[in-house]
Image (cartoon, helix red, strand yellow):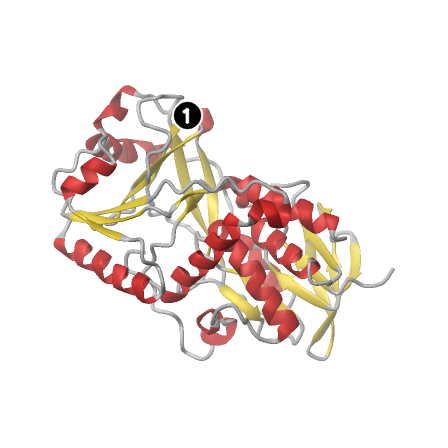
Amino acid sequence: MTAPDVVVIGAGVTGASVAWHLARRGARVQLVDGAPAPPGGSTGQATGGFRAQYASHVNVRLSLLARDKLLRFRDETGGDCGYVPAGYLFLAESERELRLLHEAVAVQRAAGLRETELVTDADAHRINPALDLDGVYGGTFCPIDGFIRPLGLLDGYLAAAARLGAQARWGVRVTGAVREGATIVALETTAGALACGHVVNAAGPWAGEVGRALGLDVPVTPLRRQVASTAPTGLLPAGMPMTIFTGDGFHLRVRDGRVLLLRPQEMPDPARFDTSFDAAWLPGLLARAHARVPALEAVAVDLDACWCGLYEMSPDHHALLGRAPGAGNAWLACGSSGHGVMHAPALGQLLAELMLDGAATTLDVTPLRPSRFAEGAPNPAPVLL
């Protein structure tokens, strides 16, 4: 059998996007994933938010490129990404938070996002009347932000890649690499050796472990994030924007007739792969939710519908995109730090450009180069966004 041009490790939405973007340009691609079937990794645990409101120029640009591709998704892949521009409403509970949101808007406008609006507390009440806005100083709203269907995005890319000849092998875990000098010539896997011309690490929260198996330093670690789901309810409208309180990250959205509630939590051992749901987190979350959305006091949480997923965190909360230091034919598309699903359409296109053209021609991804940490040039970690 002829060796595939590229083996992509990780068949979540980022790996699937990479596979399709490479295959459509003629590369022979093989996907391998340790899960028994899709969606086995973090893609299936995502809540499906999409935003361009960031405080980082490169992340805004990634979102704008991704949105362009979401609008063309059905035409390009035949799939349904479910993009709905319901908006994101960011709210500040202090003057400092409001100032940082305003500074982020300046970054967004410089990066080409014109739709973000500065809002007062009265504006916020009009946008989301369910909120108790006592102590809110104002915020920002962007109407082109909204929601996508992570599994629709994944299915569309996997099916379109398969039609172009890309093969996906499930239940196959990468355990090592065979090298000739600085080149990885084969992967050692639980299904035997797999020859490769190039290899892409798109393993999400497991990218650090995959990197170690390949003899590479990939600074990506998992971070647990829990989601509480109410019982089915019609108290909040389906088109309610994602609403985020920037100080502590409490946010909520409506999905499939339920309200999803989220708030980052401090954990004694955050860098672990355990995705069991910890109900001890709920009382604090619900107190916060009921204070800001009083109508939710009448709605029970459905414990069976709650879950925990994993973010793939990089040291500066920005993706690693490009050639991996330590191997001439290894590439990274990982470390998106909670933004992987929404940025996957852009990351796949840009990595294909880097691999096949020698440079990303659509936008400058120099800030995402994996060598930046060794160079002492990380991106400033975002304060709020």
Residue 167 visible? The answer is: no
Closer to us: 340 or 112: 112
Residue on which the image places disc 1: 257
Report x, y in % for residue 351.
58, 65
Count of marks overlaid on the render: 1
Residue 237 visible? The answer is: yes
Report x, y in % for residue 156.
62, 44
Q: Amino acid at mark 1?
A: Gly
Q: Residues within 10 Å of mark 1 (few under 14, many from 20)?
A: some
Report x, y in % for residue 149.
50, 40
Report x, y in % for residue 366.
47, 74
Q: Quadrant of residue 197?
A: bottom right
Image-based side of 28 in relation to 80, left or right: right
Image-based side of 273 in relation to 59, left or right: right
- Give SS at disc 1: loop
Image-based side of 121 in relation to 87, left or right: left
Closer to us: 268 or 299: 299
Q: Quadrant of residue 300?
A: top left
Q: Quadrant of the N terminus?
A: bottom right
Q: Quadrant of the C terminus?
A: bottom left
Q: Quadrant of residue 6?
A: bottom right
